Amino acid sequence: SPKAPSKQSLTATDPNFLTEFFNNSRLHHIATLGAGFKAYVAELREKSSRTFPARALLVESLPRHIEDRDSLGDNLPHLGAAARYIMHIDMDCFFVSVGLRKYPHLRGLPVAVTHSRGSEARAVPTHPGQNRALEIELYQKRLGERYKAPDIPIESRLSAIDEHNSLSEIASCSYEARRMGVKNGMFVGPALKLCPDLKTIPYDFEGYREVAYRLYDTIAQYTLDIEAVSCDEMFVDLTELLQSTGVSMMDFVRFVRDEISTETGCPCSAGIGSNRLQARMATKRAKPNGQFWLAPSEVEGYMRDIPIGDLPGVGPSTTHRLKQMTYTTCADLQTIPRNVLQTEFGKKFGETLYNACRGIDERPLVYDKGRKSVSVDVNYGIRFTTEQEVHRFMRQLTEEIHRRLVELRQRGKLVTVKLLVRSPEAPVETAKFMGHGLCDVVTKSQPLAKHTDDRSVIETAVLSLMRTIAAPPHELRGIGIQISKFAEGRSTDGAAGNRLKTMMLAKAEQQKQQKDEERTGRPTRSEAEERDAKRRLEQRDDDQQPSTSAAIREPPIMQHSSYRLTPTKEVGSRSTESNSVANRVSPGHRETATTSPSRRQTKPVTTQARRRGRPPKGAGPARQQSTAMPSTSTAGGLRKFLFRADNTKPAAAAAANGTSNTVEGGSANDDASGEIDPDLLAALPDDIRQEVIRDFRRQQQELLLLSSDKKNPPAEHKTPVKCPTTPVREIAKREWNTPKTLSPRGSVVSESAVDGRIQVERKFLEALPVGLRLEIEKQIALQRDSMVVVATGYDDSDAEIDEPLRVTPEASPVKQPPAPSTDSIPKDSNIFRRDNWRELVEEWIDSADEPYEYDVELLAANGEELVENRALLERLYLIMRCIHRLVQQKGTCPWHRAYRAIVQAVQTRMMVIYGSRLAVRSIQCAECNSNE
DNA sequence: ATCCTCCCCTAC
DNA sequence: TAAGGTAGGGGAGGAT
Ligand SMILES: Nc1ccn([C@H]2C[C@H](O)[C@@H](COP(=O)(O)OP(=O)(O)OP(=O)(O)O)O2)c(=O)n1
Ligand SMILES: [Mg+2]
Ligand SMILES: [Mg+2]
């Protein structure tokens, strides 16, 4: 049914790709519809008068079953007053059932919904660089690594893949097909091998939505105690309904199922139990086209034979781990003590498992859950060659996520970027056409200064995250953006009701318009009207807003196709196979292995941290001296002596009440205000000294950050504290660079004193551009015997106290420092992180009459990176000041501009992260531009 | 203790 | 060819 536009948008470089992709992505559709129905239920509940006229029909049509009312208590005696009838209702092979309405002649045959139009005979084209066998092998290998089982046999569905059969996924298949072993999510190729007669039918996204609305509307006639699960599935608490109508439970279920079937032309099944778990388990038994009540007395026996993997929440990974431990059924699971399960699977999940295998589930239905995040992912069709293409696409994604955020009427505080990067060993051309193939996942998040729904703020954050990750454009295979940490004002309330309506309406309008333009009028419309009219008669037409529900349900016309569809995407995780790939593996084949909930390697933190890092508070060599003194109070008390009493000043106070976010340097008197008495400081025991310094820095930072948040005028800013001044630098030089009471650390890569293995610090790895990082990690993995990743001993806040982070030359990033730096000096990807940054900067500015643009960009990027570390802000401040001074000396406009460019980059990022700017100085030049 | 980041897993 | 999205629960380990 999806019409193929003449113009094919093959990859994400095509401007129409996003729209095209979302219009055809089933996963995008079900995700969007699922969220839509959760909101729909919330809206219905909000606007409902809680009268259900349709219930009268029930009483008329159904005999009052003796069993019911009273038996409620009888059947669930042990639950007493809490006894409930929970129904789980789910459409049978949803996509297929909807699709078959248009292909009635295929009823009774094995049918699958898929994009692939091919039959078994047809071969898919291949491309140079593809290597299915290798890709599958690598995937298997990863599985083996993850589960510490090197000998996982080729999974059947994967092994059924040859070089030419279709890798298009089956969204849903009929029960006839299932009998042959075909499953939802399976590739078409292997499915055809299992079932050569499999018929494929196209997607009908409009149909899914329409049928789903009828499903929900039908149920909602009788009760609003509904928890939406997805577009084809929900939980319904029947307790109140049954009590107030006196109708037999099974009769009611049969009645609604029948009504749904009539309404939609599609079969559904329902399971009933005394909790959601039991209801779900009952549904499995009921399918297809049936209903099943799992009575309390039967639960125990029923659960025993259930395969562990059938429990909700137990997927391929858990199933596999349990299987390795020789557990297969719930009866097996029941023999494992709770604490053992918790040790193995984690506190919560262990408990969940312990209960689930016994049919116990205490979680109540939740009718209206607030959203916690929004995201947009595209892990298909991602093929870039230039940064510019990447940027353009990122801007599109940002636009999309921004739209969704605004739709939700939410504002978020955390921006996360997730990238799929081609694994180094994976073929460049993926087996699946335009797929992501075997990837490493890299995620990085960026807290914002305050909650925002500002597109440009989001975009800046996204772009800077991209730069931080620095993945090569041509290696990207997937991109995702997520926004979370919403402002608490539960999105809902007042605007909630309208929100959904607006959303759906907008979508409907778009479709309609598009359709109208594209085609001649369609009859579908009248169908919708008819249905709406019927609904109105039958029940909750008393809605204050008839237009709402009508409009929402409205258009059976294709909708998703148009513009605003939201995207999403995801992938597996680092150094393991991608999730989606993993999900395709049948549980039975993910053999072996076991491992604790987190199978990460435990890191030998202790030694390392102590040896090379600052000792933890109250620990370490210097500790004895200080133990007698409560450090905190000590530091606080000493501060009075350590700082001069000159609180008056400047920048901070000025900025605090000023209109500008910026303070243009404390110019005139640099050295006036607060400083630490170096001698006194030097006299202190190590740990106390450091604490004092840290405390000092904290205050410095508060000064450097001139908040722009009007809602929370930072009182501290008005507090007369010291202003950053030159003395700070002097002190830094004297006190922070020279004394090395703590063990020296020249590199983040060193040898362990304990086992002789080379230790690589985690922070070091994290700071690297992905490509490099992945390579190094791979090396480490390969040489487990001689290398190990350890917790960092490096603490940014002590960057100037201990020796600064250094990196081995090989590890330096793609971009090299602009200065003709000495090779003997250990390199860091960010020259500002080097302890000799001052020299480098001086050399750079000294070396030429005009700066290279490349160098300016590099330093701007380096500066931006420092912004991310609060603890490095002071250093950044010093750096900017140093550059300012040198550039002033230079006195030429090209250098003025260079300085401004760097400042600009830094400040933009400052605004994103802290909502304020760094108090750096500006350049006043009559010739080239002026200040600011 | 609690927070934060980066995963991992699951579901449809 | 193919359309591998999206959200939430939860855990490990480091920072505070
Ligand atoms: N891997 C999957 C699983 C599901 N879906 C879509 C198609 C399904 O029709 C719909 C509903 O999912 P269900 O899990 O309810 O599966 P079905 O409805 O197809 O079958 P069942 O009768 O088992 O519910 O979601 C999908 O696209 N890809
Ligand atoms: Mg279903
Ligand atoms: Mg379902």
Image (tube, coloured by chain):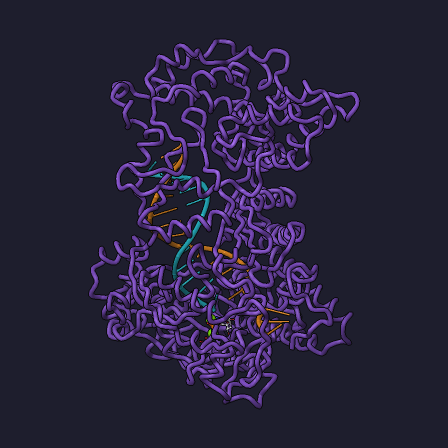
Chain colours: A purple, B cyan, C orange
Question: Residue A912 at what x, y percent from top left?
Answer: 59, 37
The residue under the point 36% across, 44% down is A789
Instruction: From the viewer's side, name the closer residue of A354 and A588.
Output: A588
Residue A340 against residue A697 in the figure, above or below = below
Image position of A851 (left or right of A713): right
In this rendering, the count of numbered labels is 0
Report which quarter residue A497 is drawn in: bottom right
Please tell me whether residue A305 is drawn above or below residue A788 in the rendered image: below
Question: Which residue is located at x 35 percent, y 72 percent?
Answer: A153
Residue A329 horizontal/vertical position (percent):
27, 71
- Whether residue A41 is visible to the viewer of this picture, yes or no, is no
In front here: A239 or A20? A20
| On screen, residue A648 above or below A109 | above
The image shows residue A371 at horizontal and vertical percentages of 51, 53
Where is residue A228? Give x, y as percent: 48, 64
| Image quadrant in which you'd find residue A359 | bottom left
Quadrant of image for the C terminus of chain A: top right
Image quadrant occupied by the N terminus of chain A: bottom right
